[in-house]
Amino acid sequence: MINLILWLLFGALVGWLASIVMRTDAQQGALLNIVVGIIGAMIGGFLLGGPTINSNTFNLTALVVSFIGACFNLLAPRRSAPLRLSRLVAPRRSVLLARRQPGTAAHHRPTQSHHSQSPGR
């Protein structure tokens, strides 16, 4: 029972420190810090092969390996380019204008309306 409590506490600590280093702390709560720390410990153990907090080893080496894994865990979504539906459905207007050939009607700026009233009227 005490190992479970320590595992959750060290997972929260590792996840919180990794989120500060990776600048995602404002986006995460305590529960997500625990999840990031525990999953990061699995990733760190896989990548580095050292002891982690998941192996009930609570020493400095286990914390460092778990911390490095948690940083990798937070880095992975940043580096992958997610396919967003908004990019497929409605591309930005500047992108559409850049794709058109010069000399087409799309490059002409719309004129201002002649029906605007002056402030004196």
Image (cartoon, rainbow, N blue to C red):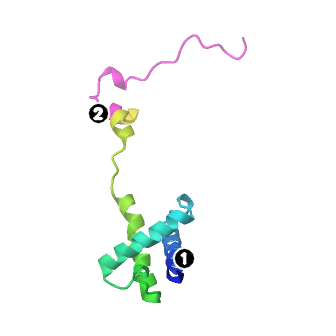
Quarter where residue 26 is shown: bottom right
Neighbour class for label 2 at 10 Å: few (<14), some, many (≥20)? few
At 29% from the left and 24% from the top, the residue drawn is 103
At 33% from the left and 57% from the top, the residue drawn is 80
- Seen as rendered, the residue at the extreme front is 1
Position above or below: 87 against 116: below
- Seen as rendered, the residue at the extreme right is 120
Residue 113 highlighted magenta (yes or no): yes
Q: Which residues are magenta?
A: 96-121
Label 1, on which residue? 9
Q: Report helix, strand or loop for mark 2.
A: helix
Determine whether label 1 and label 2 are within 8 Å by CB.
no
Residue 66 image position (x, y, % from top left): 42, 78
Residue 85 highlighted magenta (yes or no): no
Marked residue nearer the N-terminal end (1 or 2): 1
Residue 94 numbered tag:
none
Residue 99 numbered tag:
2
Position above or below: 86 against 120: below
Q: Report helix, strand or loop for mark 1.
A: helix
Quarter where residue 68 is shown: bottom left
Please identify, in this view, whether the residue under mark 1 or under mark 2 is nearer the observer. Answer: 1
- Left or right, 43 with respect to 120, comes to left
Residue 77 image position (x, y, % from top left): 38, 59
- Left or right, 44 with respect to 101, comes to right
Give the main secondary structure of the magenta stretch: loop
Q: How many marks?
A: 2
| Nearest the eye: 6 or 29 | 6
Position above or below: 27 against 43: above
